[in-house]
Image: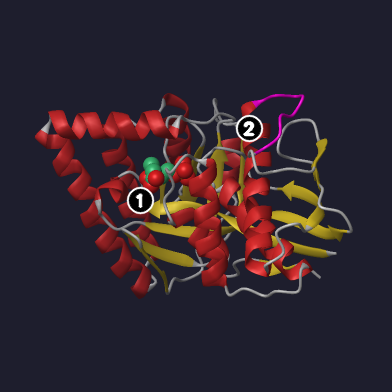
């Protein structure tokens, strides 16, 4: 049996604008999904997941060619979780040249689902690594990133960015521009994350920004302004200037708010973090609900968030320089 894990991510800068060719900087965080894979002597797939839904569940099936099987507790997130595992298994089979390989798979994730923290990418990346290693094949982080991207494309009907899967596979801070993803140097980043317990609809939020950008010049300028913030952010990262990074995160949040993708609970958490003395805070991911990320090396922001209306969970998660890896 092989157990692999892969990290989730936050966007330090640049979500939404990245859709229009501006650069973005996602960063891996010390919150992981763990996937174990044990080869079977038949071609069946048995998946046991602890954290893909509120209740753990187990599902077993033999033919994945029609996509994910129906799960009784038919919550869409559960279905989606199975979809990612199914697509990861297909990639592992393909990479190892063993199309009929069967597996017993267990999934455990510390990453809130659909909240802008890259949970699906982490499960997919760890699943491909565990599955291929169990079949005796070792892929590079770049190969895993490529296969995880293809798996996400399949599950998400052709809509996926390379950012989450690349970041999860390689770890660290990443610069994304179009299809070009590369690791960049970064200091230790003391992230604090606030989660409102909800999730935004990424497709709807992206469509909303697109419509605004077509209707108003200010919105097109705002998207370009986010690109400028990202470029300044890259310089601050290279200089290790965490205070400057915080200021730029605040500007980035303001521009995302102008584009209509924040929410009351996200704004409340952002302001609570700033009031608590964080260097800066912004929403992360598509917005509409889900998570904010703040920079604070002290305990203040985490404590303040715990008492903030609209915040369901708050935790620290430093920048994770490790990407996908085998667990001992
Ligand atoms: O919420 P997430 O982590 O899936 O991030 C969405 C990021 C967007 O820029 C809004 C969309 C995208 O595909 O890049």
Q: Are marks 2 and 1 in contact (CB under 8 Å)?
A: no
Ligand 1 occupies quarter:
top left
Q: Residue 135 location in percent, x, y? A: 76, 68
**Residue reaching furthest to the right:** 41
Q: Quadrant of the C terminus?
A: bottom right
Which residue was labeled with disc 1? 249
Q: Residue 26 location in percent, x, y? A: 44, 57
Secondary structure of the residue carrying numbered label 2: helix
Q: In this view of the protein, can residue 297 be seen by the observer?
A: no
The mark lying in front, picked from 2 and 1, is 2
Which residue was labeled with disc 2? 77
Residue located 43% across and 38% down the image? 270
Residue 229, picture quadrant: bottom left
Coloration of the structure image: secondary structure
Find the magenta span and give its range. 68-75
Residue located 48% across and 48% down the image? 153
Secondary structure of the residue carrying numbered label 1: helix
Q: CA distance from mark 2 to mark 1?
A: 30 Å
Q: Residue 173 location in percent, x, y? A: 46, 65
Residue 49, picture quadrant: top right
Please state which of residues 215 and 230 is positioned toward the viewer in this rendering.
Answer: 215
């Amino acid at each position: 049996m092989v157990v692999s894990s892969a990290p989730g991510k936050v966007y330090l800068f640049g979500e939404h604008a990245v859709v229009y060719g501006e650069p973005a900087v996602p960063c891996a965080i010390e919150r992981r999904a763990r996937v174990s894979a044990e080869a079977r002597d038949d071609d069946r797939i048995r998946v046991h997941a602890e954290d893909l839904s509120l209740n753990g569940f187990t599902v077993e099936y033999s033919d994945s060619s029609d996509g994910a099987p129906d799960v009784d507790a038919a919550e869409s997130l559960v279905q989606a979780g199975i979809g990612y595992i199914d697509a990861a298994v297909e990639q592992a089979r393909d990479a190892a040249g063993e199309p009929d390989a069967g597996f017993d798979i267990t999934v455990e994730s510390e990453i809130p689902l659909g909240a802008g923290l890259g949970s699906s990418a982490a499960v997919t990346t760890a699943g491909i690594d565990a599955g291929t290693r169990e079949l005796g094949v070792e892929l590079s982080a770049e190969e895993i990133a490529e296969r995880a991207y293809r798996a996400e494309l399949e599950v998400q009907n052709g809509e996926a960015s390379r950012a989450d899967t690349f970041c999860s596979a390689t770890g660290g801070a990443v610069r994304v521009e179009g299809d070009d993803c590369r690791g960049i140097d970064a200091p230790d980043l003391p992230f604090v994350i606030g989660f409102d317990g909800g999730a935004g609809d990424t497709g709807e939020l992206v469509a909303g920004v697109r419509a605004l950008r077509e209707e108003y010049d200010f919105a097109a300028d705002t998207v370009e302004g986010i690109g400028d913030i990202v470029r300044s952010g890259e310089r601050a990262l290279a200089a290790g200037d965490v205070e400057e990074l915080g200021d730029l995160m605040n500007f980035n949040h303001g521009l995302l708010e102008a584009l209509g993708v924040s929410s009351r609970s996200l704004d409340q958490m952002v302001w609570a973090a700033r009031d608590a003395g964080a260097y800066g805070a912004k929403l992360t991911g598509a917005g509409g609900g889900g998570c904010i990320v703040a920079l604070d090396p002290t305990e203040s922001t985490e404590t303040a968030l715990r008492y903030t209306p609209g915040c369901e969970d708050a935790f620290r998660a430093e920048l994770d320089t490790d990407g996908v890896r085998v667990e001992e």
